Amino acid sequence: MKATFNIQNKLKLYRVMAGNMTQQDLAERVGTTRQTIVSIEKGRYSPSVGLALQIAQALNTTVDELFKLETGDDHA
Amino acid sequence: MHSLIARFKWHPTLPTIIAGVVVVAGFVLMEVSGWFLILAGIGTFGPGILRELGLLNDQDEFQRQAAHRAGYHAFLVTGLLAFIFVAGFRAQSQGASNIPEESVTTILALLWFVWFISSLLDYWGPQKTASRILIAFGIAWWVFSIADSLNSVISFVMASLVAVPFFLMAYLSKKWPMLSGILLIGFAAFFFYFFHLYEILGPDPMAKGRPVVIILFVGPLLASGVALLRMAKQSEDEDELERDISEAGVK
C-alpha cells in the first residue's frame, strides 16, 4: 500500500479575484516566468514553499487558501 | 531578434541566446579546424556549469528543476549506451581504449538530445514541445529548400511545400494531440524508411553517421509523438475520473 497525494490549487480563481491579473503580471511580481505560473495552475509543477508564499502574498491570500493537499491510498 | 522570438512566446535569456550562437559558431567553424568544436561544447555545457557554480542566475526554480531532471534522464540513457558500447568493443577484443569516433559522437548526440527533449517536455509540456519542434523542423526544411532551389522559382515553391506538413502538424498538435501523436510517430517511421536509416540494423551500423542522424532527426519526432500519445491517454483517464466523481456526486 502506497500513500499518494495530489496538490490542488486555486491560483486562477485568485488571479481573477485580484482584478483579472494576467499570468505574466503574476510572474513578474514573484520574479518567475509565465510558463512556471501556467505549469503551477495546471498542476504540472508544485512550487517551493518560498515561491508559494510569494504567490500568496502577491494575490493577497494565504498558501493554505491557494493550495490544498488531497491524499489517497493507492492499493498497488 | 528578441521580439521575433517573443512572437512565438519564447523568452530565452541573454546567456541562452549567447550560448546558442557559440554552439552554432562552433559547428560552422569546425570546417576550418576541429578545435573549434570546443566552442560547441562550451556553448552547450558552459551556462549549466556557471549556474551550478552560482555564477549565473538567469533561471527560475521550475526551469532549474526541469534542467536537473533532464540531466538525470540523460545520465541514465547515455550511461547505459556507453556501457553497451564498451562491452561490445571488449567482446570484439578491440579493447575499450580503441573506441571509434562515431561511437563517441553518438554518445554525445544522445546525451544532448535526451537532456534537450526531456527539459522541454518537463518545462513546456508535450503539446507546446511538439508544436515548437515541428515549427523548428519546418523552418529548417524551408531554409534548406531555399538554399537548394534558388535557381528556379517553381522548384523553390515545390521544395517549400515539403515544409507545409510540419507547420500543419504544429497547429494540429494543439487541437488533436492523439491524432498528432500517431502522425508524428508515422512521420518518424517514414523518415527512418525514406532515408534508409534501417541500414543501422545491417553489418555496418555506424556508417554515414546513421546513429546521429536517427537521434537528431527521427528522435525529436518520435519523442514528441510518444509524449503526445501519453498526454492524450492521461487526459482521457482524467476525464473518466471526473465523470466518475460527478456521477458519484449525483447519486
Image (spheres, grey):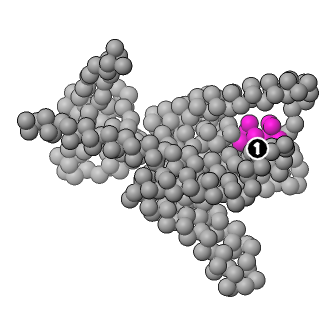
The residue indicated by pointer 1 is B201
Q: Is residue B176 left or right of residue A55?
A: right
Type of amino acid at the residue the image marks with label 1: Leu
Quadrant for residue B44, please give it: top right
Q: Nearer the viewer, residue B212 or B116?
A: B212
Quadrant for residue A55, please give it: top left
Give the magenta part as a residue range: B102-109
Q: Quadrant of the C terminus of chain B?
A: top left
Which residue is farthest bottom? B153
Horizontal and vertical percent position of residue B35? 86, 44
* Number of residues whose C-alpha sits closer than 10 Å to that of mark 1, classed few (under 14), some (14–19) or many (20 or more): few
Horizontal and vertical percent position of residue B217? 66, 53
Q: Nearer the viewer, residue B177 or B240?
A: B240
Confirm whether residue B161 shows in the render.
Answer: yes
Q: Secondary structure at mark 1?
A: helix
Q: Is residue B249 left or right of residue A73?
A: left
Confirm whether residue B3 shows in the render.
Answer: no
Horizontal and vertical percent position of residue B89? 85, 28
